[in-house]
Each structure stands twice: as C-alpha cells, then as structure tokens.
Image (cartoon, rainbow, N blue to C red):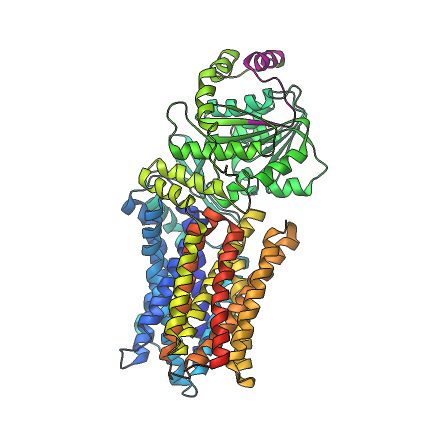
Amino acid sequence: MFLLYLLILGMSGITAQVVLLRSFLTTAQGNEMAIGVIFGIWVIGESLGAFLLRKSPSKNPWTQFFLFNSLFAILFPFSLLFLFFSRKIFGFTLGEVILLPHLLLLSLSLIFPLSFLHGALFVISARTLSLLDPGESIRPISKTYILENAGTIIGGLLLYFFLIPHLTPFQISFLFASLNFLILCFLKLRIHFSLFFLFFTILFSFEGKLRQPILSLWWGKERIFLYENTQYGNITVTEQEGEYTLFYDGFPFSILPNPEVSSIEDLAHFSLLAHPQPKNCLLIGQGFGGLIREILKHPIENLDYLELDPKLIALYQRFPLSKEELAEKRVRVFYEDGRRFLASHPEKRYDIIIINHSLPLTLNANRYFTKEFYLECRKRLRDNGVLITLSPSSLTYFTPPLQNLIRIHLHTLKNVFPFVYFIPGEFNIYIAEKEKKVFNPDTLSFRWERRGIETKIFSPEYLRIRLNPYYFERLEEIVSYSPPKEVINEDLSPKGFLRSLSYLTSLSSLRLSKFYQGIEDSPFLLYLLFPTLLFLFTLISGFSQRRRFVPFILFATGFWGMGQSILLISLFQIRFGYVFNRITLLLTFFMLGSAIGGFVSLLTLIKFRKNYLLLLINESAILFFSLLMIILIKLPITGISGEILLFLSSLLSGLLLGFQFPISNALYQKEEGGVEPVGVLFAVDLIGGAVGAFLTSLFLIPVFGIIPLQTFIILIKSFSMILSILLLTTGIR
C-alpha cells in the first residue's frame, strides 16, 4: 500500500504543478516567462522542503508523514482559490499585464507552500520507507525517486487524456485532495482522514454550484456569461448591460455586439485600398466582430480566415453579426495555426495577407512578427501582393520603449520587403510590398470612390487626415535613427518579445521598463561569470575533499535538465504555437525519461560497481546530447514528425538526468551513510533547476535567444565533466 502511496505522491505533484500553471497562464495573463518563474519557484520550494526535512525532528516519523500529507492535500485546492482571490489582494485590473515583481510575488505565494510540502514529502517518504525496509539505505531512496517519477508519468497521462479535457481545475484539485485522504485512510484509519475525504468528495460533486462565486473573486461584478478551458487556452466572456467582452487567456479580445468601429474600418480599408485589384485575401487572427464584413465590401473573390481554436468560432456564431460574416460564401474558415497553414499550402497565392496581431507579448504571438514568418508570407504573395501588419504607436508622445518597439517591427519588415509604408496612429498599420506602388491620399481616395464603399467613419476626408504629412514626419524622425547594430526580430532570437514586455511595462512602471532595456544591452559574457566562478570555487575547495565535486555536478545537471525543459517548451511554442495544449505531454515525457534513467541506473549500480566511470559516461552522454540539440534547434521542424522529435528530445533529456541521481547518491554516501544525504543531493539538484528556470526564462531566451542559451548550458556541463574526470582519476577523498 505504501508503494501505491508513492505513485499517488508523484501523480499529485505533476497535477498540482500543471493545473496551477495552466490556471495562472489563462487567468493572470501569463507568458513563457511565467512558465519559467513557476517552475523555478516550484523547485526552490521542493529543494528547501527536502533540505530542511533531511533530519527528522520527530520522534514518531509516522506522525510527521501523516501531517505533511494532510497539509499538501488541503493546500492544493486552496492554492487555486488563492489565485482567483489574488486580484483583490494585489489590485489587478481586468486585462492588465502583471508586472515582473507581482509575477514573482504571486507565484511565490501560490506555488511555494505547495512545492515545499511536496519536496519535504520526498524525504519523509524515503525515511518512512526505510523503516519498512531497514536494509541498505540506497534502496528506499532510489525506490522513492523511481516510484514518485512513475506516479508523475501516470498523472501526466491522466491529465492530458482524461482530466483536463473533461474536468475543471477545481474539480481536479478536489479529486486529488480526496484521493490523498483516501490513501491515508488505508494506511492508518482515522476519523479526521475520513471526514476530509468526505468533504472534498462533496466539493467535487457540487463544484458546478460553486463555480460562479469562485470566478467572481477574479472577475468581480462582471457577470460570467461563459467560462471554458479549451485545448488551446481559456475563453471567458463577461456581460454588462448587454455588452459582451471576450477574454482569451486573460487578455481582452473583442467586444460584442458593438465592436470598436474605427479600428476595424482602419485595418480593413487601409489594407484593401493598398492593392489596386484585391481578389484573394488571407486573414490571420481575430476576423470576427465586423472586420470580415468590412473586408468583403471590397471586390474580394476569396477570403481565407485562420483561427486556431474552433471554440472561438463556435462562440462568435452565437452573435448575429459574426454568424452573418462567417456564413458568406466567399469566406473559408480554417482551424489551423497561421504558420503551419502557410507551410502546408505552398500552392496558395494571395493579393493581400493581413496579420491581425498587435503585439508579440508571448513567444506564440512573436512568431507572427519575425523575419522567418515575413519570408514565408512573401513567398505566398503574388508579385503585386501586399502584407499588412500592426504595432502599437502614438500620435503624441513616443516613449523610448515604444520607439524601440516600432524600430524593431519596421526594420524586421524592411529586412524582407524592399518597400514598406506605414500609416501612423494609436496603432501603426504597416504595408509591405515586393513591388513599389503609388501610395498617396489621392490614389487611395480614387480607389475608395470607384469601389463605392459605405462606412460609418472611414471616408476620403478621414483618409486625408490620417495621412497627414505631419504624423509621418514625426514618426520618420524616430525610425530614421540607426543604432550601431540594428536589431531584427527572429524566431530563435525573439527580441520583439522582450521589447513588447518593456513597452507594456512602461505603461505602469518606467523603472521596471528601464530594467528590461538594461538587460537587453547586457553582454553575454556577464552571464558566464556566475557558473565560471562557481566552478573555480568548487575546483579549488575540492582539492582537499573531492566529494564536494558531486554536489556541483548534480547542480549543473539540475540546471541542464531545467534549461533543456524550458528550451524545449519555448522551441515547441516557436515552431508550433500551441504549447499550452502540449505542455503536459512534454513534462510527462521528461519525467518518463527520468524514471527510466533512474531505474536503469539503479540496476547498473547493482551489476557494475565502477561508479566513477558510470558518472563520466553519463556526463559525456549529456554533453553529446546537448551538442546534437544545436542541430535540432536549427532544423525547420513541422507537422507531427516535428512534434514527435521534440517529445523524444524531452524523453532523452529526462533519461540522462534521471540516470545521474542514483550514481551521485551512491558516490556521496560512501562518505556519509544513512538517508540524510538524499536531502542534500535532492536539494542541490533542485537548486540547479531553479537557477536554470529563472536564468533561462527571464534573461537568456528573451535577451539572447535559443542558440546562445544552449551554448550556455553546454559550457556548464563542460565544467561538470571536468570534475567527473577528476573524480575518475583520483576518486572521492
């Protein structure tokens, strides 16, 4: 029964982590930075829990075991409840982008207590298992490690295929709270365990009646018309006095049935008037609410409209305006990612491609503002075709973050298209072409009148006001400045993502925005200073006591494992754009590899006693795999085969990571017996993971990109390999 409990411990850990992560991303406007922060705080909590509980202060270990398990089971649903209540605590407004300090504080409050208990339970469980199996101390430690990982795998698969598609986050949290108290009842029947099991079972059964009061903690007085988690994100629709506001992953997306007319007419008519005879048009993102209707007022023969989430289309068809637009015979809707669509339909050619994304605030959104994407669009445009894209701007004051955002957008476009025009406004409309055309108010007015278009705001007079030379001159002054090295936004170097964060942050905090600008200018060598100094310190201090090399090696491997996980998650987002749907599988494959690696390592230790050589072989394999990852990163992977390749990479990285822990534990315990060293090694491993999570997600990826991140990881593992060679040649002393 206790071995079954270890499986449930692993299932509960991955479930809590994924459910809280998904809820955080969809409720609190999180991006890929938030993923790294949450992972980092989770492993910090786990490492502290394991380290502080490595020595048992309790005379009765079973009392400690039951106490920590009860607290973990209770805290999971209450952490989720705290997330929805946090808006009142921190004073967030709906649709607000959470600043980095608030992100850290909220993640710390939300994640740390739960992860601390989970890390403590690893050591407590290993100690309890050693009481049940009082043999060699390696066995209960390794058995706990392997069984918990096995539970993590089972939990991840259950989440992806059954729980997430059919249950709400609160139902999942209530279910696992009940499951934990049920197993405690089997281990030791007590009345309060039974009462808690009954309590959470009742909450699970009546979650539907509790949903509206819980959601109101975040959404306030707004009436929740719809709240649904789809496989691609979260859709929330609020209603107030007949006006419906749609939020997608916490961001305001659209207003119905009365959308903002001026922005819709600007985008539709400036785009279509830029072409003398538009026939075939491609629209990527947010076409409903009147935009499609305005586009179809021009002589369009075919309009291909791309929307990844089918639930969005189903929702908008509830409203007469959107239903009418989508029912038009000239409109074809494709439920597909924009980049995948262009790659998989090389035969299609368009007169106009409209990218209706305004800000690369996530790696997913950044994919539509990169050099590689613009190159793909150029291939799909006819010779006289036009690409339309947007970015935030101003008609009054241009802050430095806004200037930097406009520059990178414009220079990335100019890197691909020889002719780029822009229409100044609160949102700049960029018109990129392969062939130079006449672009002036008279030409656009002539096309407007010839097509006989009726609108509410847009008109020849309005057109001349918007194309006032004064606005162009002001914007030209900003974009004409050329720094020593002009920055281009690329898939693997997402500088647009960082500059978008800097711009949005500047709307609330200029000081924090300067921080983002500062790290963008920081040299790569500065980040290499920390691992280099740590390596030198370990090397010098280890000459008298080589066993000190083992924690550094495990720290480096923890950093490597987390760095590879964040890299693979980010790479999946860059290549495919729907990591929200696949993140559970990526983590599950990683943990599957970790469990296989731990099991194989344990068997190898029994048959093959040369632990130093095993460690060196493992280190060499990690370094070789890291070098191969450089090739994978550069491959333009697409389709199912590309996804499988990333899942296998996650599996292999987990396997290499999991193989090392039992070996390091066996080496370290030659000097110190008992179970206590497992807390030290487990903590060191997780601290490396925490540093890897923060450094990769907050700095290395946004500032330098994917390939420099992998270079940094390779350097750290090169240091640990040197120490492994020294251990092999001299041994621990």
Q: Position of residue 182 (x, y in %)?
A: 40, 70
Residue at figure coordinates x 43%, y 88% from the top left = 135
Is 723 placed left or right of 388 in the picture? left
Instruction: Name the foreground residue: 321 vs 394.
Output: 394
Instruction: Name the foreground residue: 661 vs 181.
Output: 661
Q: Is residue 266 above or below residue 615?
A: above
| Residue 578 visible in the current orientation | no
- Give the magenta part as a residue range: 431-450
Q: Quadrant of the N terminus?
A: bottom left
Please say whether residue 723 is one of the residues in the magenta stretch: no
Outermost residue toward the bottom?
A: 135
Q: Is residue 319 above or below residue 344?
A: above
Q: Is residue 683 above or below residue 221?
A: below
Please say whether residue 432 is one of the residues in the magenta stretch: yes
Q: Position of residue 334 (x, y in %)?
A: 63, 39
Instruction: Name the foreground residue: 493 vs 283.
Output: 493
Q: Quadrant of the C terminus?
A: bottom left
Q: Quadrant of residue 655?
A: bottom right
Q: Position of residue 24 (x, y in %)?
A: 40, 50
| Residue 264 visible in the current orientation | yes
Q: Quadrant of residue 78?
A: bottom left
Q: Position of residue 376 (x, y in %)?
A: 64, 38
Outermost residue toward the right?
A: 347
